[in-house]
Image: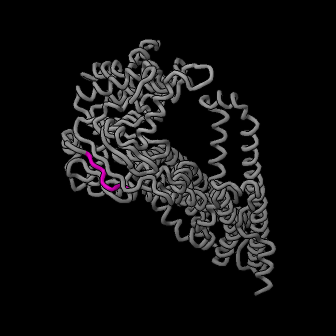
Amino acid sequence: MKKLKLWWRRHVPEPVTAPIGPALSEHKWYRKAAELSDTGMLTMARRLPVLIGQVMRLAWRASRRDLAATIAFNVIAGMFTAFGLLATTGVLTALFSAGPTPDRVRAAVPELLLVGAAVAVRAAFATGAQWAQARLRPQVQQIVEQQLYELTTAIELAAFDDAEFQDDLHRARLRGMDSAPSMVDNAVDLFTAAVGVTAAAGALGVLHPVLLPLLLLTALPEGWAAVRAARLGYLTQLDLVEVRRRGWIMSELMTERRHAAEVRSFTIRAFLLRQYAELAAHIRGVLLDLARRQTVSQVWGDVLKGVATALMYTALGLLLWRGVMPLAVAGTAVLAIRAGQTSLVNLVYALNRCYEDGLYFNDYMAYCQTAEQRVQRTCVGACERDDTETQLQALREFREICAEEVTFTYPDSDVPSMHEVSVRLGRGEIVALVGENGSGKTTLAKILAGLYAPQAGVVRWDDTLVEYLDPEALRRAIAVVAQDHTHWPMTAADNITMGDDIAAAGVRASVDEAATAAGADQVIATLPLGLDTLLDKRFAGGCELSGGQWQRLAAARGFYRDAPLLICDEPTAALDARAEHHLFDQIREHAARHERTVLLITHRLASVRHADRIYVLDRGRVTEHGTHRDLMALDGLYAELYELQASAYRQGGDDDGVLTIGAGNRPLGPGARP
């Protein structure tokens, strides 16, 4: 037994992926995910029926009629396969009988007609099964894509800061979605092949029972080799998930239009090519090693299959030699063996594909299960409350928003970004968050907007905790002018309305008002088709905007949305001094006219002087708060930052006596003081 184990280990390599090159393994973003997987053959043998059941339920949801037709037609085709094989015995018996050849041929004609009819009927039903199966695939594809996108767009924002979640999503998108329709095909093919094997086995069992186990024995080596090759391939793909994702990012940097100018300006081409070459070399090495391992497995499978086939034909010869089986029956047995082997090959291939696709489909199902749990946690308590519209109406009439002792830590981080932060926003107030980069201003804004859930502390709208609010209602009660806003590849109108029909009553007037307030009307006036202009140069007739023009559209988007809370996160970062001054004036005017509460995040401290309350953040904590006058009197961090910005606009400061402009702020005027 020990010698057998040693021989097995020496000649049949274990499914271990290729070692990682030292240069690549130094990167912190690389993680060997294969070690976390459990994809043993016995494990997948237990999982495969469950996965097939899940994918068949998807097919049932997609089209009951097509699935039922596929199964029924395949069963009927298999029955006629068995009938045709048994009818062949009558043909051979008539041909091998004694007597003149013409008489034997005439005696075989009725059986030949039966065989021909069986072949024709079988072909007709097989074609019908293929047609119904082809109809299933796009319908299943639509269901799995819709399910993934529904979950991904509903999951909490913090998930996208989690590297493990990103890998799970990447695997689900990479092969998981495609594996579902493929697995439907393969499951049907597996069923079809099983019917064929059953038909051939039934015929052999009738002819002589000893041939049946020998026929099945020929499938075991090839099945082992196919399943082993599939497992090796999956482990390799799992091991390469992060490497491939990094490679695609590098590819995007070298091929996308938005990166092209900087790639050339910083002459970074050679660096990117080296990075990509390193990744590609690692992937190539792993795949070459995979090819070697799969080939070794396939060779051993073919050798063992040849031995099993030789044993089967030896047994058939012995039966003939001893006179146990007539020659006509032996001829039918040979045909049944050939048909059975063909069906067995198809069965093994379908099983292999089911096994391989099952590994990827399991990734898809695991992601969907995890995502559903995250979505349910996000909505905890909301289902016990009023419907979305009722909650939204209550939120529109809020009097105060409070964050109390809020602490928040990003996934995979040990240091809190927010630590026991408390802020208050009253109805109709303009509240500013200021501080140096990395102080937590944007994170706090996302917590107040319900995009992040704090690990400690609470956020309330009046007396209602955010966790008990319907996320949809909460987000519709908030408008955001983001610093890193999306350049939606849609029309200018879509970039403002975000899904509202521009032709609906009152929408066009609201769009015009919002665009005018944000200064975006001047941008729209320069577009060839106005609001109907597509804002994406990748498509014919599309236009591209400058950073400042995009920022005006983003501001118009926030003004257009009918929400009681407006969050402005660095809304003027790409604007010139005149446009910045105009936009801040419009924010104050818009808030007063519509009684909107404004949360303003900005480094332009001259623009927050008129805020009702200013919170100063430093390393995730509120260190100061009050009005502009209060904070200047306090002479703390706010006063220091304000003085630094104000001094940048005073005369002097360099040897040439030239006016120094700093931080992109609107000038306060010579000698201006807080």
The residue shown at (49%, 51%) is 161
Looking at the picture, how far across and down is residue 247, in whole percent? 67, 45
Between residue 472 and residue 639, name the one nearer to us. 639
Between residue 585 and residue 641, name the one nearer to us. 641
Asked where in the image residue 672 lies, by quadrant, the reply is top left
Classified by dominant secondary structure, the portion drawn in magenta counts as strand
Q: Is residue 453 above or below residue 494?
A: below
The residue shown at (65%, 33%) is 255
Left or right: 228 in relation to 412: right
Between residue 628 and residue 400, name the one nearer to us. 628
Between residue 184 and residue 401, name the one nearer to us. 401
Looking at the picture, how far across and down is residue 579, in whole percent? 42, 20
Left or right: 288 in relation to 415: right
Q: Is residue 629 magenta?
A: no
Looking at the picture, how far across and down is residue 113, in whole percent? 60, 53
Magenta-tinted stretch: 401-406
Q: Is residue 48 above or below residue 500?
A: below
Left or right: 444 in relation to 340: left
The residue shown at (72%, 54%) is 24
The image quadrant where one finds the N terminus is bottom right
Q: Is residue 512 above or below residue 431?
A: above
| Residue 93 visible here | no
Task: In the displayed orientation, state which residue is furthest to the bottom.
Answer: 1
Q: Is residue 671 above or below residue 243?
A: above
The image quadrant where one finds the C terminus is top left
Asked where in the image residue 434 lies, by quadrant, the reply is top left
Q: Is residue 404 magenta?
A: yes
